[in-house]
Amino acid sequence: MVRTAPSRRSRPSPGRRRNTQQPRYSLGHLPLVFIGAIIVGVLVSWVLVPTTTVRIVPAWEPLNETIEVRGEPTLLVADARRMMAPVRTAQTSVEGSQVLAATGRKPILHGKAEGWVTLINRASRPMDVPRATVVSTANGIRFETIEDAHLGPDGGAAKVGIIALEPGEKGNIHRNEIVRVDGVLARQVDALNEDDLTGGGMRDVPVVTSDDRRQVKELLVAKLEQQAIAELKKDRALKPGDEFLPGSLYFNIQKEEYDHESGDQAKSVVLTLQAQVRGSAVNVGEVTSMVEKAWQPALKPGYTVPASTVVLGQPSVKAVDPISGALALGVPITGTAVARIDREQVERSLRWMSEPEIERYLTDSLPLAEPPAAVIMPDWAERAVRVTVVVEEPGHKRDD
């Protein structure tokens, strides 16, 4: 038997393996392809299918109330039904003084008119006119000489300085208004001012007013309140969260002294106070929490108050009982009453409506604060089955 040598083409090369497997296509890949096609189809339909987006602002009304709360020292826990909260009292003594610049003004006479007068001797003998001789005008404005004068006989004259007896503008006179010498020399000596006399005037001076006394007391009491609160907070009867609100202190004043009365001419007024102080502390967080939970404002039918709109203010003291320390508190609370909107029901009602139809329907059927805004996308669509309603909060600013 003749053996033939194997062909070189069929002989495998050392160290190299020939891949004789054919590519395989498994049916297991088909579900993935199918799912991908579905996703693509959904995305395309989501983009191409018309959608109506409607924005509405429900009608709303502001709510603003002050809830009265009674603070009682005999109470141990808050009583929401009767709107009462516990009060804890403490006592201390304070003393201090306060200075306040006077704000009143009062005009006073300031400065005496001065000038010169000529004295003329009518006697036949020399005459000496002593300092402080009085000369005057016809209407009684008087001046006195400020130096001695010697007058020769028969018309001898001398010019001497004079000054008004009283301060003020009335001493400012014109020339030739002085007409006589008063006293024993009246028949022997004449007087004449050849020039105007000037220098008399008025000026304003500070004066203490009743408002100054009231204001200095307010300032001092406010300062002593802070001093008293710092001492009262050290009382061991107080609990964490207790606060002394403005106006919650009662002052039993034992000493009240002003250094000036109303109307006194002075640059300032000083007040000194001594007092026994009793403070009534409340837990503000406890009070506001009680008010928030118990608040039931009167609402129109179909309205509600979203919790996000409710704001409580700081309690204020309306009155304090000087004997028991009980407090009358006012707690301000505000909110917004908003008309209820059933968003899903509205979306069902608006299917296959045009934009004008949607806006007319909503305006007629819902209590709205603003005209509704409807947009159908894509632009070529006039109606849509798919509707999304966005309910905006009152006061929300729409983008143009």
Image (spheres, rainbow, N blue to C red):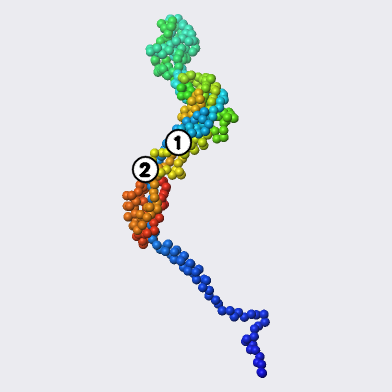
Picture layout, residue 146 above or below residue 369: above
x and y percentages locating residue 81 in the rendered image? 46, 34
Picture layout, residue 9 above or below residue 149: below
x and y percentages locating residue 89 in the rendered image? 54, 28
Q: Residue furthest bottom?
A: 1
Q: Which mark is residue 301?
A: 2
Picture layout, residue 256 above or below residue 243: above
Residue holding disc 1: 332
Instruction: Residue 5: tell me if it is visible.
Output: yes
Which numbered disc flags the more N-terminal residue, 1 or 2?
2
Relative depth, front residue between 322 and 111: 322
How would you rate the neighbour count of disc 2 (Cα within 10 Å): few for under 14, some for 14-19, many for 20 or more? few
Residue ID at (39%, 50%): 342
x and y percentages locating residue 187 in the rendered image? 41, 6
Residue ID at (42%, 19%): 169
Relative depth, front residue between 130 and 50: 50
Relative depth, front residue between 1 and 305: 1
Residue ID at (45%, 41%): 310
Instruction: Residue 248: tell me if it is visible.
Output: no
Q: Is residue 192 left or right of residue 73?
A: left
Do the residues bearing badges 1 and 2 touch, measured as CB atoms within 8 Å?
no
Element on which disc 2 rests: loop
How would you rate the neighbour count of disc 1 (Cα within 10 Å): few for under 14, some for 14-19, many for 20 or more? some
Element on which disc 1 rests: strand
- Marks 1 and 2, Cα distance to the nearest angstrom? 24 Å
Q: How many marks?
A: 2
Type of the residue with mark 2: Pro
